[in-house]
Image: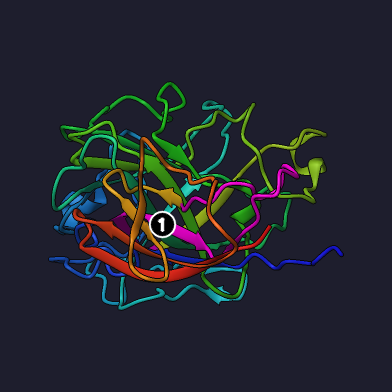
Amino acid sequence: MKYLVYILLFCFSNLKAQNLITNPSFEEIDSCYGQFADIGFDVFKWTGCKGWSNPIKSSSDLWCDEPIIGNFMPPNLIGYQKPRTGKNMASILIEPQPLIHSYREFLQNNLSSSLEADKLYLLTFFYVVASGNISGNCPPNQFGVYGSEIEFKDSVSYFLSNLNPLGVSEKAKFIDDTLNWSKCEIFFRANGGEKFLIIGNFQDSSNTSYNEPCDSSFWGGLNMANEYYYLDDFSIVEYFEYSIPNVFTPNDDSINNLFYPNVIGLDDWKMTILTRWGNEIITLDKNNPTWSGENYEDGIYFYVFKSQSQEIVKQGFFQLIR
């Protein structure tokens, strides 16, 4: 008789790590500019916005409720856009212009500490599309992140398509929503020593992917990615994730024949497998990650999963069924 076995995974991830982004929602600020920034103007440095800067000549914007120069309200499809958190938010433009085919704006953050080599990190932030994909706009659906050991400053460039980002967001998960703030996630592995992160769209206008449908008539029959994005609530944390199955079936059917945890971002993990009487069978780790169950009977087995670097000690059990 064939048995239908449901293989469940107990999943655990890093949810309480320290956020390395300095001033994640732009609230630590000396003054407020209150209008679009002119080309070549670093509005973050001018306003004393802690931790943030404009890395190239194209000028990103900073919006706040109490400006001292100008009183322009940040526009949106529904009138004007409010920050997601607090009183302040940033914005960037991704748009080809007549004389600058791949015009891009970026944000740069001075992290609270440098990234560690070969560690996996998760960058998240929230965004709103200003136009709501109207008037011919084709919202780009991918952001990237680039890291540098020293502050990046290029006073003549309008784009950074010459750089290879550490990571980019998944297009399928980059969903535009004109009414509510949506989340963007970027997973990447650090080279080590990155103290400054640059965030934006690193594709040139000929290769930028964007959300459909687009009104190509606005560009004379060509779809060109272009949009103005509001950004708020940045976070970057060291990321790890592990999942442990509660059943495995070593019956030589090429399906689920080995027992192993799925581990991401934890290099020092160890899992000890024991009998129901507490006798140790084997210890799995990064270099020896699987157990075949050979010469052991069907039944319940116990495990202890550990990671010293993340102070993890997880105990549980699983079932061997042939």
Is 107 part of what is drawn in magenta? no
Is residue 73 visible in the rendered image? The answer is no
In this picture, is 96 found above or below 138?
above
Q: Quadrant of the C terminus?
A: bottom right
| Amino acid carrying mark 1 in the image | Glu
The quarter of the picture where residue 158 lies is top left
Find numbered disc 1 in the image and state the secondary structure of the residue it sits on.
strand
Which stretch is magenta?
232-261
- x and y percentages locating residue 180 in the rendered image: 56, 74
Q: Residue at x 40, y 67 (%)?
A: 72
Which of 3 and 104 lies nearest the eye of the viewer?
A: 3
Picture mark count = 1
Is 243 part of what is drawn in magenta? yes
Which of 50 and 114 lies nearest the eye of the viewer?
A: 114
Drawn side of residue 80 relative to residue 207, left or right:
left
The residue indicated by pointer 1 is 241
Q: Which residue is drawn at 65% across and 64% down?
A: 7
- x and y percentages locating residue 226 in the rendered image: 61, 44
- x and y percentages locating residue 11 in the rendered image: 48, 66
In this picture, is 45 found above or below 204?
below
Q: Hey, which residue is sitting farthest top in the picture?
A: 162
Which of 66 and 118 lies nearest the eye of the viewer?
A: 118
Is residue 97 visible in the rendered image? The answer is yes
Tell me, what colour scheme is on the image?
rainbow
